[in-house]
Image (cartoon, rainbow, N blue to C red):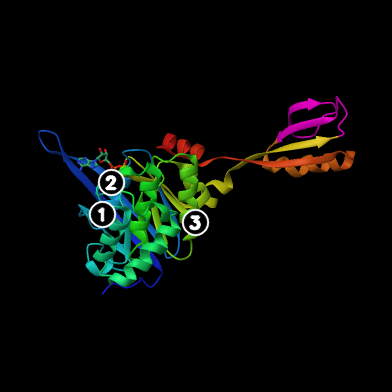
Amino acid sequence: MASVSPNGDAIIIDHFSKSYRMGFFLRRVPAVRDVTLRVRRGEIYGFLGPNGAGKTTTIKALVGLIRPDRGRLTVLGGPPADPSVRRRIGFMPENPYFYDYLTVWEFLDFHASLYGIPKAERRHRIEDYLERVKMTEHAKKRIRQLSRGMLQRIGLAQALIGDPEVLILDEPMSGLDPIGRWEMRELLRSLRGQKTIFFSSHILHDAEVLCDRIGVIFQGRIIAEGAVGELIGSSIEGYEVALEGVPETVPVGPAQVLSRQDQQVYLWTQPADLSAVMDVAHTNGWRVVAVTPQKRSLEDLFMTLVREK
Ligand code: ADP
Ligand code: MG
């Protein structure tokens, strides 16, 4: 029987490797190499990397669709292929295969029945989840009539319908326009604390605003892992400071002047020099209008990590 590991990890990936046989000679080409990571219970974890990095391969192994060549994957204390574990996982594949001619309602009813939920209860749940993903008014539409954004939302409702403890979502934000992305992010955010969520994305911004922790995968290997704050929080590269009342030609301490206009000065300073700049401003009686930290984005972080490899 599956149980939660004592340390509260919902997902443990331990030295997972997988290769595919390719080409005429069926040469083994590695897709994932020695990936190790943990997701704590209740956490939102972003699994980030560019196309072809190995995200889908890892996710397939996490839901028991493929077997690892090496290593072990554990969800809620047990192997993902175990039906008692599988029932506690909600899964949304990358390109959800939908039954075009089913209606939205029929599709969800079908998935709910796979969980063995009785008919009366299914009805309540479907209503509830349609409401949550804002699809109530589309319940009678056929799947093939839906827009990409609606498909993704129905895919999420399908993953949620069995009330799983762990949600595993492969690129839930892909193919969505900015509003669709925002809606999907808000939906996932609304589940924070209720579910453990593991999702993949090649868009770093999704993770920056949503995740507790992230793992970055590149060419099958994890190249960074940690709290979003740890990975990018420490990356304040400097501060933009706006001062008022600074006479034209006066230098402003250890800072680089970006622009001067009348008595307004915009400057850039290293983190270590910020207090010195504030002192100079204070001593001279200049007004500090704004101090804006300039953060390195996850995009920058990613490019740096990739370059270091
Ligand atoms: P991602 O989801 O990050 O885009 P994938 O896990 O889908 O990455 O793919 C990782 C690598 O494995 C890629 O080079 C891809 O071409 C290869 N690959 C994925 N699935 C298969 C498969 N069924 N057969 C052969 N190669 C595959
Ligand atoms: Mg993929």
Foreground residue among 204 and 191: 191
Q: Which residue is depicted at the point 35% across and 47% down?
A: 151
Q: Of the numbered discs in the image, which one, if any, rests on residue 32?
A: 2
Which mark's residue is nearer the viewer, 1 or 2?
Answer: 1
Q: Give amino acid for label 3.
A: Arg
Compared to residue 76, the image places residue 256 above or below, namely: above
Nearest to N terminus: mark 1 or mark 2: 2
Q: Which residue is depicted at the point 45% across and 39% down?
A: 177
- Secondary element under disc 3, as helix, strand or loop, is helix
Q: Does residue 98 appear in the picture of this structure? A: yes
Give residue 70's quadrant in the image: bottom left
In the rendered view of the protein, which quadrant contains the C terminus? top left
Residue identified by numbered label 3: 189
Q: Quadrant of ligand 2?
A: top left
Q: Which residues are magenta?
A: 245-268
User: Is 228 positioned to the left or the right of 306 in the image?
Assistant: right
Q: CA distance from mark 2 to mark 3?
A: 29 Å
Which mark's residue is nearer the viewer, 2 or 3?
Answer: 3
